[in-house]
Amino acid sequence: MIENQITLETIFQNIKDTKRLPIIFVGSGITKRYTDKKYSWEELLKRCIEEYDDNPTNKYKWYRQKIKNEYGIEENDSYQMYKYLGTLIENDFNLSYYEGKIRGLSVPEEEENPLKYFIKELLQTYKIDEKMCQEIEELKKLKDKMVTVITTNYDTFLEDHIFVNHKRLIKQKMFVDSELGTLFKIHGCVSEPSSIVLTHKDYENFNKKSKVLSAKVISLFAENPVIFMGYSITDENIRNFLKDIYTCLENEEEYRAFENRLIIIEYEKGIQNPIVGSHSIYFDGVQIKLTKITLEDFRLFTTSCT
């Protein structure tokens, strides 16, 4: 316990010594941890299918099989699989709505996409998990400790409760404003349903602009640490973003400086004391090293960080 705790404290003391505020990437694990909206990406898609099919689990499997057969997508290629899943589900959901089969939803005329409006209705209201109130209070201490917040989450938990001082920028709007003191919602927000990145087309449009975001972050991580929280180390959003940044680097010195500033905070149930160690991500012949901190109680992270 002592060795791990000292290591954890040392990591964040080194951050404090730089006198530079970190950039933080926040994933869906945070919303699941602190609210009643406990959807993974797969669970969210199944919940949408539930509106027009009596057996959403089987329908979800049917979609995956169709994608594998028609597009040659491998079962383990979750990033590509989810893009096509979003496309097929959007088509069937919207057709079902216009056919009058989804009666519990009333989409305003100005909204062009029933599925994205449904996701807004599903996620825009939530309840805080009362058991986590104390931990949320600790997490609020991060609001003045992060120079920039980047999230793929659609919901508004972060801006409602944690990073209340940050200016929220949604999708394309992030490319015309400063990155300092901002909360970038790079996959859209329920406050603007049309902004939600869900389908293959949505992702293609996003990918065309993602290098601009990478360039913004590159200008920051030259001196600022980068923390990932609420994501899995295997999350495709992290891997693709890191790859975009890595390809922009020019020499070994820049590679090492980048890796030394990468920290991922992972939740694992039953971890009594933080586990701190190095971890590597491999993709397309590239290896990126980072510091991985595994813990159950995020208060240990916020206490060390603040």
Image (cartoon, rainbow, N blue to C red):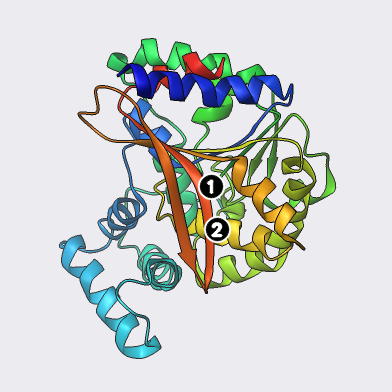
Where the C terminus falls, by quadrant?
top right
Q: Nearer the viewer, residue 126 or 26?
A: 26
Q: Looking at numbered disc 1 in the image, what kind of residue is underneath it?
A: Thr
Circle 2 sits in a helix, a strand or a loop, which is it? loop
Circle 1 sits in a helix, a strand or a loop, which is it? loop
**Residue 286 x, y percent position in the rendering:** 55, 68
Q: Residue at x 39, y 47 (%)?
A: 232
The correct choice, above or below, for 126 with respect to 40 in the image is above
* Label 1, residues with CA under 10 Å away: few <14, some 14-19, many ≥20: many
Task: Examine the image and state in which quarter residue 230 appears.
Answer: top left
Where the N terminus falls, by quadrant?
top left
Q: CA distance from mark 2 to mark 1?
A: 9 Å
Residue at the disc numbered 2: 197
| Disc nearer the start of the sequence (2/1) | 1
The answer to whether any part of residue 165 appears in the image is: no
Observer-side mark, 2 or 1, equals 1
Q: Residue at x 18, y 62 (%)?
A: 57
**Residue 98 x, y percent position in the rendering:** 42, 66
Q: Which mark is residue 78?
A: none
**Residue 136 x, y percent position in the rendering:** 43, 17
The answer to whether any part of residue 207 appears in the image is: yes
Q: Which mark is residue 152?
A: 1
Q: Residue at x 56, y 49 (%)?
A: 193
**Residue 9 x, y percent position in the rendering:** 49, 19
Q: Looking at numbered disc 2 in the image, what kind of residue is underneath it?
A: Val
Task: Examine the image and state in which quarter residue 252 appears.
Answer: bottom right
Q: Residue at x 30, y 62 (%)?
A: 101
Kindly check if marks 2 and 1 are in contact, taking CB atoms under 8 A apart as contact. yes
Using residue 75 as the reference point, say whether residue 216 is left or right of it.
right
